Image: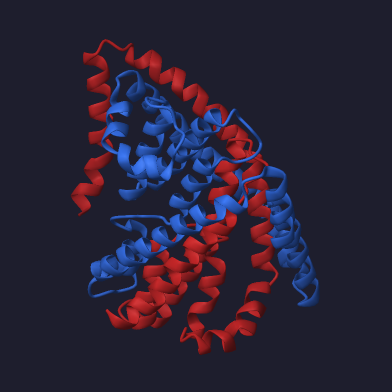
Chain colours: A red, B blue
Amino acid sequence: MDFIANISIPAIVLIIVITAWIKGVPVFDTFVEGAKEGAKTAFDVLPVMVGILAAVSVLNASGFIDVLSNLLKGLAALAGISPEIIPMLILRPFSGSASLGLFTEQIRAYGADTYLGRALSTIMGSSETVLYTLAVYFGAADVKNTRHALAASLIASYAGMLAAVYICKVL
Amino acid sequence: MLNIIWVIMIFTGIASGLLMGRTKEVSDAFLESCVNAVELSITMLGAMCLWSGMMKVAQKAGLVDGLARLLRSVFKFLFPGIPKGHAANGAIAMSISADLMGLGNAATPLGIIAMKELSKINGNSPTASNAMVMFAVVNAACIQLIPATVLIIRQQAGSASPTSIIPTVWIASLASLISGIAAAKLLEKRYRDPAYGLKRTASIW
């Protein structure tokens, strides 16, 4: 598994560069041309990142997540969700760094091979920081009206996370 | 949509910070987040240049079209309206492949490239097309064959078998992907008219 992960990038780059060279593409010139566009995009995305990270960090620092988790505990118990998992369910779609920090902390506290450890690992491995992805992708494309993107992405995100909570009870 | 969410996040953060006596933490968070955003952007700048350059080379070599041809039937269902041979096909295929292999550093730049190509087809309109939303949703489902970061953290936390979660990760990702695609397909009709969509969005979020 490690080998596959390590070899994939060099293999892709090699295939691209060799094929282009055989076909007579001016490889380096083309690369630089594309890279310039990439640099411009990265700068375009910077203001979006500042905005999103500011809002997320403020929310994290305020202690609001703890309050919300406490409020939701009763509801979660009815659905068969362990209270320890609630903060992760709230945080995961909104903040990548905060959920990774929380995950590292919780997996040490609860043990990696317990139900909680496996459920939290599955949530981390199968979900994405939806808000950040949407803001960056649509920000780069200059889209103001994202229509149903947030609703559908959050449905995808929560379906995956809830699936993780229940599957780990069975498997 | 982001306008409202942003206001809610900032307001909730500052208000609960005040109520819970955490104004110093909130104040620090504002300043720190700017530094973090710049760090993140600079880290991404290199990867963005590298993958944008590679994509350009792959496109000129005809590799991108080849990849897109392999995935044509799936793409026809998920992203209708992309012209044949358009760069968007290849960009989406590359981005999803990077996701699958867990290449985080490559996946975001490739995703941005794909979104920009989709936006070109949409006439660079400020309103997202169905294909653009579907692409965002497929990304949200985060289909990953090997969740490398999680495996490393599990190992560090003393797991007897870090990889034991791979099957559950696959099932959960699949559940996420299927629900997301279904949700996007169902919702796209309700949000068809841009003006109507805006009003709906405002009332929901």
In the figure, residue B89 lies in which quadrant?
top left
Please say whether residue A166 is visible from this viewpoint: yes
Q: Would residue A153 be found to the left or right of residue B26 on screen?
A: left
- Residue B55 location (% of width, % of height): 38, 28
Task: Say above or below: B55 vs A100.
Answer: above
Q: Residue A140 placed where, x, y %?
A: 58, 37
Quarter assignment of residue A1: bottom left
Q: Quadrant of the C terminus of chain B?
A: bottom right
Near-viewer residue (A83 or A76): A76
Q: Nearer the viewer, residue B63 or B43?
A: B63
Q: In which image quadrant can residue A115 be found?
A: bottom left
Q: Is residue B11 left or right of residue A153?
A: right
Q: Is A64 above or below relative to A135? A: below
Q: Position of residue A168 (x, y in %)?
A: 33, 78
Identify the residue shown where x is 47% and y is 33%. B113
| Residue under the image location 72 percent in, 45 percent down | B195
- Residue B6 showing in the rendered view: no
x, y percent for residue B76 = 38, 40
Write the residue at 55% across / 75% down.
A87
Between B55 and B181, the one lying in front of the other is: B181
State how many labels appear: 0
Residue A12 falls left or right of residue B76: left
Residue plotted at (43% across, 57% down): B141
| For residue B123, above or below residue B159 | above
